[in-house]
Amino acid sequence: MTGATLPQHVAVIMDGNGRWAKARGQARIQGHRKGVERVRDLVAACAETGIKAVTLFAFSSENWRRPRLEVRLLRQLFLFALEREIPKLHENDIRFSAIGDIAAFGAEIVRRVREAEELTRHNQRLHMTIAANYGGRWDVAQACRCLAEEVKAGRLAPADISAESLEPYLSMAGVPEPDLFIRTGGEQRISNFLLWQLAYTELYFTPVLWPDFDRVQFDLALASFAGRQRRFGRTGDQVEAAWRA
């Protein structure tokens, strides 16, 4: 696959951990643990392929509605993954970031996240972002609050508010918008994930459950992306002419 047909930023909803475990007679947390292994594999595949950014939806703002025990175990798994995986990411020149209202997970996780971000902030091979306690509507709302403060302070006129003026206040500011969105597990919706950033992203849905989403499945997603023509409002002829030029 050539650089021209390779997505530079891949966003993923990792769906199906619980169903994967249930089908094997296991507790749901076992599926989540297997899912962490698959995250490790995907990050390695992105780095090896030359993709520059990967953003993973780990815990949505709606996931607090899950059973209390599962939420507690997910929090513990998040902490364990931070302790175990961050040194490996740093060794491989991978930058780590987290977006979302992570304060809800408690002071220990917040501290670990900030330490990981500081440790890896100069790494350049791949930028890995975890969305935790994140929601796309929350993201836009908090950006709007920041703009409102700018207006209140007299630094911005309401008439000057635009899409461009909002973007610096979004959680993914400074990161190119995703080229490819992948959702595993069979559902075909974006579930309040990166609502602003996915406006022109190519969508790929697969019935494969996340713990089974291996390198072969990832390559299928990349092949699907490579076969698409991204027009961004232009005609197909215009795209072809620009490509030939």
Image (cartoon, rainbow, N blue to C red):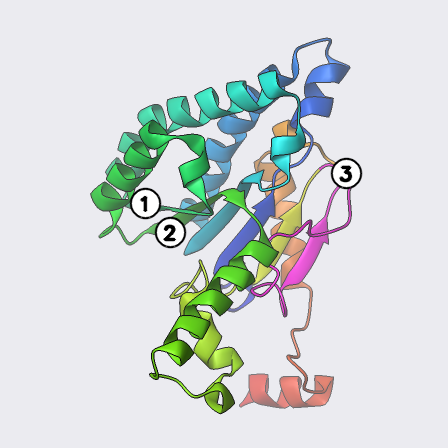
Q: Name the main secondary structure of what is drawn in magenta.
A: loop
**Quadrant (top left/top right/bottom left/bottom right) for the N terminus:** bottom right
Q: Can the viewer see residue 197?
A: yes
Whether tag 3 and tag 1 are in contact, CB under 8 A, the answer is: no
**Residue 33 rendering spot, x and y as whole percentages:** 53, 20
Left or right: residue 172 versus residue 201 is: left
Residue on which disc 2 sits: 127
Q: Residue at x 78, y 40 (%)?
A: 186
Residue 205 vs 203, above or below: the answer is above
Which numbered disc, 3 or 1, marks the residue that appears first in the sequence? 1
Task: Say which residue label 1 marks.
Answer: 94
Please tell me whether residue 158 is drawn above or below residue 18 in the rendered image: below
Residue situated in front as seen by the camera: 108 or 14: 108
Q: Which residues are magenta?
A: 185-207
Q: Is residue 6 visible?
A: no
Q: What amino acid is found at the position of numbered circle 2 in the picture?
A: His
Mark 3: amino acid: Pro
Among the 4 quarters of the image, the one containing residue 181: bottom right
Taking the spot 69% from the left edge, 67% from the top edge, the residue there is 228
Which image quadrant for residue 242?
bottom right
- Residue 177 - label: none
| SS assignment at label 3 | loop
Label 3: how many Cα within 10 Å (few below 14, some 14–19, many 20+)? some
Q: Which residue is mark 3?
A: 207
Do labels 2 and 1 touch, CB within 8 Å?
Answer: yes
Mark 3 and mark 2: Cα distance apart in space:
27 Å
